[in-house]
Image (cartoon, helix red, strand yellow):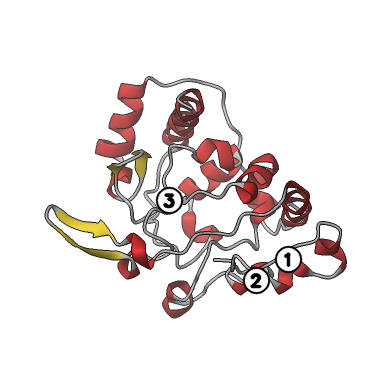
């Protein structure tokens, strides 16, 4: 993660290439994404080379001002777990917090990140169909049918922790990206830990609807 000592100047982000200079300390900005297991294991932070295809700009601005941990056990959970009385548990002493920055700097960085769109072709293939799903059926599909809770938290302290938590996924991710990544994770990152479940079109829609429902609940719970 970024060092807390870093200081950004909003107007300088684009002019002086601070996105490359400072963010690239922990994030891949220019691509390509990790092509080998060794490269994937060496990642310190999420790949940002396709941030413009992935994130919602307003979320980036908000999150950079008040960062919270999206991946409970870091980029590679094997580096941040320890034995516990009920099995593996997260060793928080090994995790590093992301630096918080000003609204001006966050806005400037978000604007630069949104320009990174190498996969417009994948996004264009997705069409989100409006719809709803009950929480009971959504959770059954997510957990029992797809097995996603093995790696993902669907609420704080409930679910797996080797992947990013998903109870705020729809608040930070573009819906078309969620659909595309579920459809074929390796099209985005060949060495991602997430398997291709070969989910049907209707199944993808149901998963996106469930993630959207979870995120609305998370917002309402605040």
Q: Residues within 10 Å of mark 2 (few under 14, many from 20)?
A: some
Where 210 falls versus 15 (above or below)?
above
Q: Position of residue 64 (x, y in %)?
A: 63, 51
Q: Which numbered circle lies on residue 123?
A: none
**Residue matched to label 3:** 164
Q: Position of residue 35 (x, y in %)?
A: 51, 74
**Count of residue discs:** 3
For the point 35% across and 60% down, which residue is it? 92
Q: Which numbered circle lies on residue 24?
A: 2
Distance Cα–Cα, label 1 vs label 2: 7 Å
Q: Residues within 10 Å of mark 1 (few under 14, many from 20)?
A: many
Q: Residue furthest bottom?
A: 38
> Considering only order in the chain, which callout, 1 or 3, is on the residue closer to the N terminus?
1
Cβ–Cβ under 8 Å for marks 1 and 2: yes
Horizontal relation, residue 23 to residue 68: left or right: right
Front one among 190 and 83: 83
């Amino acid at each position: 993660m970024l060092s807390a000592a870093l200081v950004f100047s909003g107007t300088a982000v684009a002019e002086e290439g601070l996105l490359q200079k400072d963010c690239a300390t922990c994030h891949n900005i220019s691509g390509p994404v990790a092509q080998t297991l060794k490269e994937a294991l060496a990642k310190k932070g999420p790949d940002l080379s396709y941030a413009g295809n992935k994130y919602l700009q307003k979320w980036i601005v908000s999150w950079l001002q008040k960062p919270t941990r999206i991946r409970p056990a870091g980029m590679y959970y094997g580096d941040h777990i320890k034995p516990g009385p009920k099995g593996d548990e997260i060793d928080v002493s090994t995790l590093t917090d992301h630096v918080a920055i000003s609204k001006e700097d966050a806005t400037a960085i978000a604007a630069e990140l949104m320009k990174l769109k190498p996969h417009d072709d994948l996004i264009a293939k997705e069409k989100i169909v409006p719809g709803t799903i009950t929480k009971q059926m959504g959770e059954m599909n997510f957990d029992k049918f797809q097995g996603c809770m093995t790696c993902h938290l669907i609420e704080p302290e409930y679910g797996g922790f080797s992947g990013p938590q998903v109870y705020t996924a729809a608040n930070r991710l573009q819906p078309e990206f969620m659909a595309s990544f579920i459809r074929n994770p390796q099209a985005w990152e060949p060495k991602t830990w997430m398997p291709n479940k070969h989910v049907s079109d209707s199944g993808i829609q149901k998963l996106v609807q469930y993630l959207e429902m979870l995120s609305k609940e998370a917002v309402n719970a605040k």
